[in-house]
Image (tube, helix red, strand yellow):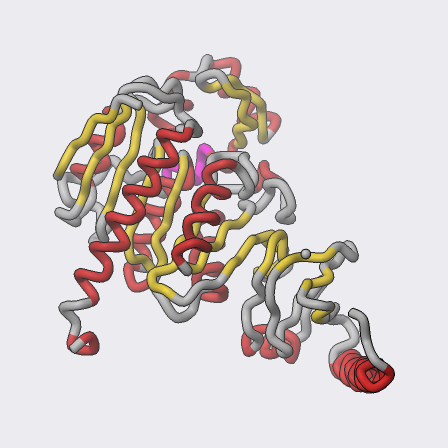
């Protein structure tokens, strides 16, 4: 284990117009035929290089002719159609997981592995870290995916029913459905770090590496419940959800989150007892006002892999949202990507 400390946008002729009219007629006929087969499915059609979303807004990206976005309940036939469809590329798209809609961004590249960002507790998918990672992935042709957790922002559901278990299973679902040809590096911030560890231990076949930023595994018990006043605990238990101040931020904490957290403890594992075998890079601030940096050291000791590095920043908040923090994040990501290729070069398929 290595520990590093850092200080800081036609004209058309008559012939082309006629051709365009013919294409539009064929497109309309095709759409009508689709709707006759699956009347409850909403199809998103290609429009001059943009995707027209559910709200009629144009979404940059590309879409294969078989791609569909569905809304409402799906029949078995629709489920099969969606499974066979190519993934959409763009921002704020939706995918159904059972009866629930998950809002996600996806931009596809040609290089392996893919990158998926997992945000902090109660925070939406789009923030400075996600934008920074997205831009890096586009420049380097890596697939990038991020999503709103169940009960958060544009995803459906009640946050009070959101749990670490639910968000972990949703993450696995998204990887299986959206990132099908390459393992993924999970970049998790806060609770996203906890989720990334659970995904990596449950489905090591899907994960090429982890980059955690101010990860807070077991926080529901060790950092919250243990330090809450008895009356606050009672309010959470009685009301189902209650807003508390943690560090300098207000968070809605639910009874479900607390109780489910006890089924997903990570730091209770003995040294090397957590079945995470991929490269792990742990970034934390010595000045973190919510999660003590000692958590990073405990985590490094718990994971099974020996390819683990802890990067401690002498300055910075829990959110690690300064430019220097983004540089550290990208540097750690590149390190994991490099280690993935080194590992890949040892396989028989690589020659």
Q: Which residue is at the front of the view, 136 or 152?
A: 136
In the rendered view, tell whether residue 174 sits above or below residue 21: above
Residue at (43% x, 58% y) in the render: 172
Prevailing secondary structure class for the magenta stretch in the rendered image: helix
Magenta stretch contains residue 260? yes
Q: Is residue 34 left or right of residue 91?
A: right
Locate the N terminus by quadrant. Answer: top left
Q: Residue at x 59, y 58 (%)?
A: 90
Magenta span: 258-263
At horizontal 20% and vertical 78% (from top left) the residue drawn is 349
Task: Relative to 3, say whether 112 is above or below.
Answer: below
Residue 36 in sight here: no
Residue 28 in the image: state x and y as whole percent: 82, 80
Snapshot quadrant of residue 33: bottom right
Image vertical order of residue 19 relative to residue 249, above or below: below
Rendering coords of residue 147 (x, y %): 53, 49
Q: Was residue 1 drawn as part of the magenta stretch in this picture?
A: no
Q: Position of residue 256 (x, y in %)?
A: 51, 37
State which quadrant residue 330 falls in. Answer: top left
The one of 75 and 27 positioned closer to us in this rendering = 27
How many numbered marks does the figure carry?
0
* Residue 55 x, y percent position in the rendering: 77, 54
On-image quarter of the C terminus? bottom left
Vertical arrangement, residue 200 with respect to residue 263, above or below: below
| Left or right of 171 in this view: 206 | left
Q: Is residue 11 left or right of residue 295?
A: right
- The answer to whether residue 102 of the structure is visible from this angle is yes
- Residue at point 80% right, 71% down? 11
């Amino acid at each position: 284990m290595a520990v590093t400390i850092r200080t800081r946008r036609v004209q058309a002729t008559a012939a082309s117009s006629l051709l365009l009219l013919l294409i539009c007629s064929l497109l309309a006929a095709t759409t009508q035929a689709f709707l006759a087969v699956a009347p409850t499915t909403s199809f998103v059609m290609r429009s001059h290089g943009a995707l027209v979303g559910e709200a009629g807004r144009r979404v940059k990206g590309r879409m294969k002719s078989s791609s569909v976005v569905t809304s409402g309940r799906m029949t078995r036939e629709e489920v099969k159609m969606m499974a066979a469809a190519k993934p959409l590329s763009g921002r704020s798209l939706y995918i159904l997981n059972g009866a629930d809609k998950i809002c996600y961004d996806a931009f596809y590249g040609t290089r392996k592995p893919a990158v998926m960002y997992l945000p902090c507790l109660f925070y939406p998918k789009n923030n400075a870290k996600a934008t920074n990672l997205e831009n890096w992935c586009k420049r380097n042709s890596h697939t990038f995916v991020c999503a709103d957790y169940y009960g958060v922002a544009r995803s459906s559901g009640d946050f009070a029913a959101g749990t670490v278990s639910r968000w972990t299973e949703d993450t696995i679902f998204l990887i299986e459905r959206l990132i099908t040809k390459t393992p993924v590096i999970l970049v998790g911030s806060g609770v996203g770090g906890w989720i990334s560890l659970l995904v990596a231990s449950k489905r090591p076949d899907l994960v090429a590496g982890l980059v955690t930023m101010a990860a807070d595994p077991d926080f529901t018990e060790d950092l919250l419940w243990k330090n809450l006043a008895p009356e606050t605990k009672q309010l959470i238990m009685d009301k189902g959800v209650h807003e508390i101040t943690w560090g300098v931020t207000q968070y809605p904490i639910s009874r479900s989150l607390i109780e489910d957290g006890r089924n997903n403890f990570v730091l209770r594992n003995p040294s090397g007892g957590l079945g995470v075998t991929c490269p792990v890079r742990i970034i934390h601030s010595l000045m973190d006002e919510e999660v003590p940096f000692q958590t990073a050291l405990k985590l490094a000791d718990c994971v099974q892999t020996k390819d683990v590095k802890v990067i401690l920043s002498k300055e910075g908040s829990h959110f690690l949202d300064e430019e220097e923090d983004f540089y550290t994040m990208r540097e750690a990501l590149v390190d994991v990507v490099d280690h993935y290729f080194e590992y890949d070069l040892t396989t028989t398929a690589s020659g």
